[in-house]
Image (tube, helix red, strand yellow):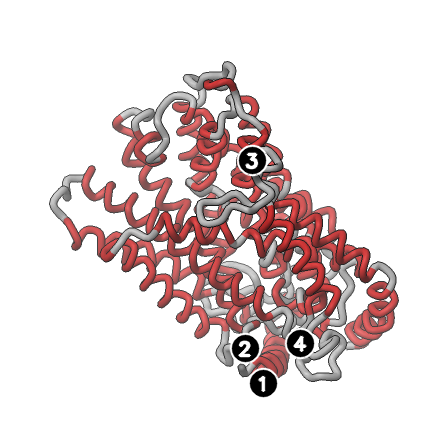
């Protein structure tokens, strides 16, 4: 594992390059280039040169409102329609399912607030989490997060490919067969890869402009689907405890999956950007899009069979809009994949890949392409992949609980230099590279989640005694409280000196 060499070299090289670029053409110099960031290291339609190295002040740009479009656009994905439909399938009525959808959307306030860590440190979330788990203790979650990111990118790519293939058929290419599917896959991958490879500024621009188009299209879809929804009581006697908990797991799993990445998209913001501004703007973006599409799924599920969600919704639409609907499914798949693919490239740098972000992303794209080819042409393992990915919430719910608890205890103050120091004398090396409290809290949360998980691949022994409820998400609460109990006195005391030293160094620089 080349973690120490890669991180140290990447930090030094990136910081030097960023400082030089910022000093000549950064916002402080009053110069703008291209489409407007004014930073050559992060310009639209140019390859971003920074990775996980701390973003220097002279290269920082943008404002909190950029986060609205980022989270709004990336969550205009058909997945939320499916999630809303699943809530109804668990026995909830229209209004009950809608309430769950709204509560799920409100969780974006937590995701957005976690972005403050990126503003304070100028680096990626999975670098910052070294403070909670230790340099080596952070590695397993980093690896699993990369697997999850690529897994969901494969699923989105397959969905987008099938939607585009169906569009080809509607347009008259009915006998295209493998050639049509291969072309659809190539187009879907190319759209995703090009934007994610260019980097942060291009990702933000693409999410914003695609959001305009997708929001208009999905707005029309709501007009067609919502009026005929059954607003009455749930069929079959309503949902029991099991149905309610499963609905919450489905609706909250999406926002939870973003916990390892909010700082990836705030690290370029100026240091004086406020917590309130990023929380409100980012949360509103994720809330509006996820709730709108979730409600569309709820409404559709009260009218038709949603076993095949795309076909189910398509059957509720007028013929002239069906081709547009397929383009919306494709566009939503691409906007979400762009986000996960970009973060996966930073993730690989955290894992020690000694390449630039733009080169590391090639690994993610190659694995995504191979997985998509396998799912589309060899054997349809999409359902099995989704089941596996959903099982990983046993890890990521507790991981999120520990990370958020650590961030709150530290008041989002970190020693940025120490986060990139992998030497044994680093502040976040702890004991043999592991933070005992963080690892103990993670294990406690995982144990609770595993005992109370109800999924296709695993049913915990406490599920039946608890009335069939799935309490996996509470693993985050167990992990967070355990971590707080173990370090509530030691963390604030230990961070004050290093954080103050780091702040003084940054100010003097």
Mark number, residue 5: 1
Disc 3 to disc 1, C-alpha distance: 49 Å
Determine the residue positioned at 49% across, 25% down. Answer: 91
Determine the residue positioned at 69% across, 71% down. Answer: 134
Q: Position of residue 237 (x, y in %)?
A: 50, 18
Front residue of 380 and 39:
380
> Which callout, 2 or 1, points at the residue further toward the start of the chain?
1
Q: Position of residue 66 (x, y in %)?
A: 59, 51
Mark number, residue 352: 2
Q: Are marks 3 and 1 in contact (CB under 8 Å)?
A: no
Q: Position of residue 54 (x, y in %)?
A: 65, 72
Which SS class for mark 4?
Answer: loop
Q: Is residue 487 left or right of residue 160?
A: right
> Which callout, 3 or 4, points at the residue further toward the start of the chain?
4
Q: Are marks 2 and 3 in contact (CB under 8 Å)?
A: no
Q: Can you say whether 79 is above or below 264 in the image? A: above
Please give the residue where the numbered disc 3 appears in the rendered image. Answer: 468
> Which callout, 4 or 2, points at the residue further toward the start of the chain?
2
Determine the residue positioned at 42% across, 40% down. Answer: 78
Mark 2: give few (<14), some (14-19) or many (20+) Cα within 10 Å.
some
Q: Are marks 4 and 2 in contact (CB under 8 Å)?
A: no
Please give the residue where the numbered disc 4 appears in the rendered image. Answer: 420
């Amino acid at each position: 594992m080349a973690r120490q060499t890669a991180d140290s070299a990447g930090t030094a090289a990136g910081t030097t390059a960023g400082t030089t670029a910022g000093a000549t053409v950064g916002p402080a110099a009053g110069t703008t280039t291209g489409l407007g960031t004014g930073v050559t290291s992060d310009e639209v339609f140019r390859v971003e040169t920074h990775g996980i190295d701390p973003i220097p002040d002279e290269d920082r740009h943008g404002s909190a409102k950029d986060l609205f479009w980022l989270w709004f656009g990336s969550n205009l994905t058909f997945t939320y329609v499916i999630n809303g439909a699943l809530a109804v399938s668990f026995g909830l009525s229209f209004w009950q399912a809608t309430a769950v959808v709204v509560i799920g959307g409100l969780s974006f306030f937590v995701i957005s607030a976690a972005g403050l860590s990126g503003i304070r440190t100028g680096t990626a979330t999975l670098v910052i989490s070294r403070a909670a788990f230790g340099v080596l203790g952070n590695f397993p979650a980093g690896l699993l997060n990369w697997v999850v990111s690529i897994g969901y990118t494969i699923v989105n790519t397959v969905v987008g490919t099938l939607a585009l293939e169906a569009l080809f058929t509607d347009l008259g290419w009915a006998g295209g067969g493998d050639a049509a599917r291969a072309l659809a896959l190539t187009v879907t991958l190319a759209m995703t890869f090009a934007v994610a490879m260019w980097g942060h500024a291009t990702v933000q621009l693409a999410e914003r402009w695609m959001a305009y188009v997708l929001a208009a299209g999905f707005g029309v879809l709501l007009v067609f689907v919502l009026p005929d929804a059954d607003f009455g009581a749930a069929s079959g006697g309503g949902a029991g405890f099991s149905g309610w908990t499963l609905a919450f797991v489905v609706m909250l799993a999406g926002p939870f999956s973003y916990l390892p990445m909010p700082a990836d998209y705030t690290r370029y913001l100026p240091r004086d950007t406020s917590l309130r501004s990023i929380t409100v703007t980012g949360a509103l973006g994720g809330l509006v899009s996820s709730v709108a599409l979730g409600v569309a799924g709820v409404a559709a599920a009260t009218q038709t069979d949603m076993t095949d969600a795309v076909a189910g919704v398509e059957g509720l639409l007028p013929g002239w809009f069906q081709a547009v609907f397929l383009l919306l499914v494709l566009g939503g798949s691409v906007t979400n994949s762009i986000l996960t693919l970009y973060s996966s490239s930073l993730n690989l740098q955290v894992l020690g890949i000694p390449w630039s972000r733009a080169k590391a992303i090639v690994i993610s794209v190659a694995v995504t392409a191979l997985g998509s080819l396998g799912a589309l042409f060899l054997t349809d393992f999409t359902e099995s992949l989704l089941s596996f990915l959903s099982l990983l919430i046993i890890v990521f719910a507790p991981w999120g609980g520990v990370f958020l608890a650590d961030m709150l205890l530290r008041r989002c103050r970190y020693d940025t230099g120490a986060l990139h120091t992998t030497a044994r004398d680093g502040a976040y090396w702890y004991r043999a590279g592991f933070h005992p409290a963080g690892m103990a809290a993670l294990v406690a949360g995982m144990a609770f989640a595993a005992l109370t998980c109800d999924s296709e691949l695993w049913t915990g022994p406490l599920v039946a005694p608890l009335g069939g409820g799935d309490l996996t998400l509470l693993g985050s609460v167990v992990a967070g409280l355990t971590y707080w109990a173990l370090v509530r006195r030691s963390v604030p005391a230990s961070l004050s000196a290093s954080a103050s030293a780091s702040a003084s160094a940054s100010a003097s620089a």
